[in-house]
Image (cartoon, rainbow, N blue to C red):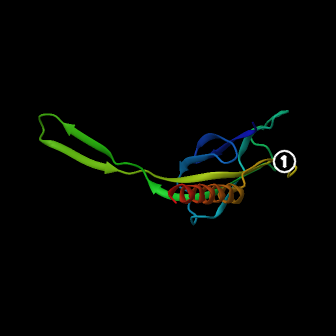
Amino acid sequence: MSFAIIETGGKQYKVSASKIIDVEKIDSEEGKVIKFKKVLLLNDDKNIEVGNPNIEGAVVEAKLLKNIKDRTILVFQKRRRKNSRRKNGHRQRHSKIQITKILSKDGKIIAEFKADEKKTIKKEVKKDTKKETKKVKK
């Protein structure tokens, strides 16, 4: 199974095709394709390529699914015997992305996710099960 390690938002993520991950907020519209050029490591089934620090020309493409807020974290500060207290809430923003392609430095596709094929297969399966249930009911 091929994978890559990318850097975004000051953090590193191990990604593979079709994987959905949460990253720091990306300022873009939902449904747009995002390209990550800070690729630290590439691994296909045969060999591993390590960057120094990045692999020049390697790209990981992802689709932005949603920009969302995390749950509320309460920040409470109290100074004892001073009648001083402060209560604050914080909701971190992050983006949910789905990895679609992993490209090596020469532009060769290492891994790819084809969403259209999966949707059509699921639709066909649903249609077949509906037909079978109708036959049983009659």
The x, y position of residue 48, in whole percent, is 81, 33
105 left or right of 76 in image:
right
Q: Residue visible at 63% across and 45% down? A: 19
The x, y position of residue 79, in whole percent, is 19, 37
Residue placed most toward the observer, 58 or 15: 15
| In the image, residue 24 above or below residue 76 | below
Instruction: Check disc 1 and report the residue beneath it.
Output: 105
The x, y position of residue 85, in whole percent, is 18, 43
Q: Residue furthest front?
A: 138
Q: Residue visible at 81% across and 34% down? A: 45
Local packing at callout 1 (Cα closer than 10 Å; few below 14, some 14-19, many 20+) is: some
Q: Amino acid at mark 1?
A: Lys
Q: Residue visible at 54% across and 60% down? A: 134
The x, y position of residue 99, in whole percent, is 66, 50
Q: Residue visible at 76% across and 38% down? A: 2
Residue placed most toward the observer, 53 or 129: 129
Mark 1 element type: loop
21 left or right of 70 in image:
right
123 left or right of 41 in image:
left
Residue placed most toward the observer, 112 or 84: 112
Q: Residue furthest bottom?
A: 29
Q: Quadrant of residue 128?
A: bottom right
